[in-house]
Image: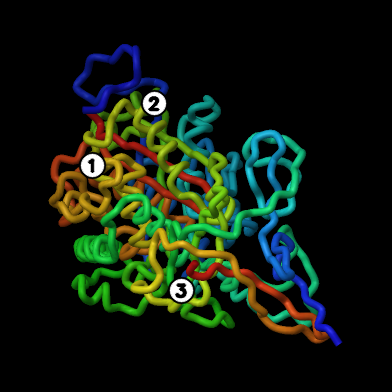
């Protein structure tokens, strides 16, 4: 099982072993994901922030740093707007935007401030209010030009989406999955669909999920095709929601009551990667290489391997994406992602439960919130507080997000020893 | 009167023998289709124009049924690896948008087609790949 940081002496006490240099989740919260017509993003973020502070038994006055992540309201000054609701204490406030890795990047911003010694405690919140945005990525760009004149970095005379392949998210991730199928014989439509079957099934136990409805494999495969092989039930919805986490340094945590220490969850690894150059990524986002790099760094940092993971929350924006990340995160044999889902391993009662929250496909994907909501999910299981969906005896978990462009965040969390 | 034709994108060479033009980094060989300041792989700043081979294989595809407004669907979007190892994103044309017809590993070759004429009578020419 997991090893602690190298070479540090551990204090002898009945509480958990805490290194001064370590960083911990002290409190965390997520709103139910869904559609909030009577709340705006500031309401959602403020509600979640206060709840995370209360969960950690602290207040905004204890915070030394604050980061707020949102993608679609990136220029709105979300951090300062939330401060004006929950407490304007004058601390450094960061507005963070990093595609679908926005939440994870906000969390890391707080973590880095603590690691740098500027802060003992900090608050990260991620939020998005998307409403019914519809299809993301292909922006209906094929408006016929009145005059064909070259413009932009490709000298295009009119919109290219639909002429030069697809820029729509269901299609981009379908191609990512089909690329894996090309390289690894035997991955088929049904195996991709099983991922969605699993996540919809899991969601029935999560009261915070946007949708909590089981669908049969036939219903999933027979649903309207968005971008083959992704049907409507294999795509995450748009929605609204927020999630928050309070982080604390090990040094500060040591001075807190034992019962607070026992609920704290250690961040054993925190990694953010971007794309190394690959030939294929010039025309199709490469979601694999940077995930593999992030996973390798995270396992190294935490001193754990994929076999040590009791649960994984990974970025299943589409069913095709989840399947390839089994391989990218090393959860299965190389090339064996299809066999992995067939074996039942990623189901809640399987060897490596994946997305017991229902995943983005059912829990929802308010973009800025996602990279903290998965921290909430893993931390809640490690604390043994996940109710009906609790993964029994969970001690180590991994949270993964990827934003196109690309940015990948991987965090490994460990239960207080 | 001859109709004036323009390529949909500047990396498409049109005419009797159409082909795609890439900018190849003179230092590391990395290929790009967009306007470049420097090489994303090695950082060098010199490029030479190269002609991309017209033949290749489909290494990934999707059949888009729900497209953004104004885009006719279904259509086949694919990633092509050409015989000289260049990755290209393109539609697969002259092939039914059906998973029984489009196949991973399918051999394809470059073709061009008209996508319409503007108010000044200029015709835009797009590229696609068709089964070879």
Answer with the quarter of the image where residue B127 lies. bottom right
Q: A325 or A393: which is nearer to us? A: A325
Q: A114 or B72: which is nearer to us? A: B72
User: Where A78 falls versus A310 (above or below)?
Assistant: below
Q: Which mark is residue A22?
A: 2
Q: Position of residue A310 (x, y in %)?
A: 21, 41
SS of the residue under disc 3: strand
Quarter of the image with the N terminus of chain B is bottom right
Q: Are marks 2 and 1 in contact (CB under 8 Å)?
A: no
Dot 3: few (<14), some (14–19), or many (≥20) neighbours within 10 Å?
many
The residue pinned by badge 1 equals A383
Real-space CA distance between mark 2 and mark 1, rounded to the nearest whole angstrom? 18 Å
Evaluate whether residue B12 shows in this view: yes
Evaluate whether residue A207 shows in this view: no
Q: Is residue B57 left or right of residue A228?
A: right
Between marks 3 and 2 in the image, the one whose residue lies nearer the viewer = 3
Q: Chain of mark 3?
A: B
Between marks 3 and 1 in the image, the one whose residue lies nearer the viewer = 3
The residue pinned by badge 3 equals B64
Q: Chain of mark 2?
A: A
Q: Position of residue A99 (x, y in %)?
A: 53, 54
Dot 2: few (<14), some (14–19), or many (≥20) neighbours within 10 Å?
many
Q: Position of residue A347 (x, y in %)?
A: 18, 54
Residue drawn at the location 35% of the way across and 24% of the way down: A255
Dot 1: few (<14), some (14–19), or many (≥20) neighbours within 10 Å?
some
SS of the residue under disc 2: loop
């Amino acid at each position: 099982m997991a090893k602690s940081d190298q070479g540090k002496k551990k204090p002898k006490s009945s509480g958990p072993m805490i290194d001064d240099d370590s960083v911990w989740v002290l409190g965390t919260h997520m709103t139910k994901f869904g559609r909030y017509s009577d709340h705006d993003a500031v309401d959602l973020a403020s509600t979640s922030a206060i709840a995370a502070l209360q969960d950690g038994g602290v207040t905004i006055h204890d915070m030394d740093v604050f980061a707020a992540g949102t993608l679609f309201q990136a220029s709105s000054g979300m951090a300062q707007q939330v401060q004006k609701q929950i407490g304007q204490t004058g601390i450094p406030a960061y507005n963070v935007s990093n595609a679908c890795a926005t939440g994870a990047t906000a969390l890391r911003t707080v973590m880095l401030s603590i690691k740098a010694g500027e802060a003992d405690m900090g608050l990260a919140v991620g939020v998005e209010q998307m409403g019914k945005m519809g299809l993301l990525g292909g922006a209906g760009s094929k408006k016929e030009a009145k005059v064909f004149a070259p413009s932009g970095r490709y000298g295009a005379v009119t919109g290219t989406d639909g002429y030069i392949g697809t820029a729509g998210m269901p299609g981009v991730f379908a191609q990512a999955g089909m690329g894996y199928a090309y390289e690894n014989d035997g991955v088929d439509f049904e195996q991709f669909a099983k991922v969605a079957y699993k996540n919809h099934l899991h969601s029935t136990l999560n009261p915070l999920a946007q949708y909590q409805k089981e669908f049969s494999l036939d219903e999933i495969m027979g649903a309207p095709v968005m971008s083959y092989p992704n049907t409507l039930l294999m795509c995450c919805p748009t929605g609204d929601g927020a999630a928050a986490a309070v982080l604390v340094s090990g040094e500060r945590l040591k001075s807190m009551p034992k019962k607070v220490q026992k609920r704290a969850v250690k961040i054993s690894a925190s990694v953010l990667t971007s794309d190394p150059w690959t030939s294929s990524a010039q025309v199709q986002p490469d979601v694999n290489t940077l995930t593999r790099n992030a996973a390798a760094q995270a396992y190294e940092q935490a001193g754990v391997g994929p076999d040590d993971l009791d649960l994984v929350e990974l970025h299943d924006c589409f069913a095709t994406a989840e399947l390839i990340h089994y391989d990218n995160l090393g959860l299965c044999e190389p090339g064996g992602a299809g066999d992995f889902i067939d074996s039942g391993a990623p189901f809640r009662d399987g060897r490596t439960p994946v997305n017991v929250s229902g995943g983005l496909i059912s829990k929802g994907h308010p973009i800025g919130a996602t990279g903290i909501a998965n921290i909430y999910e893993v931390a809640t299981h490690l604390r043994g507080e996940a109710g009906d969906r609790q993964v029994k005896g969970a001690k180590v978990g991994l949270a993964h997000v990827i934003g196109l462009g690309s940015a990948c965040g991987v965090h490994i969390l460990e239960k207080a020893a | 009167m001859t109709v004036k034709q323009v390529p949909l994108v500047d990396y498409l060479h049109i005419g009797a023998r159409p082909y795609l033009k890439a900018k190849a980094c003179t230092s590391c060989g990395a290929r790009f289709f967009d306007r470049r300041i420097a090489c994303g792989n090695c950082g060098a700043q010199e490029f030479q124009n190269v002609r991309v081979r017209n033949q290749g294989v489909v290494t990934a595809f999707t059949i888009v049924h729900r497209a953004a407004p104004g885009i006719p669907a279904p259509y086949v979007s694919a990633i092509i690896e050409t015989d000289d190892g260049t990755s290209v994103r393109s539609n697969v044309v002259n092939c039914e948008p059906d998973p029984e017809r489009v196949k991973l590993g399918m051999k394809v070759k470059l073709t061009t087609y008209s996508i319409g004429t503007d108010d000044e009578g200029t015709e835009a020419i797009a590229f696609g790949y068709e089964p070879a």
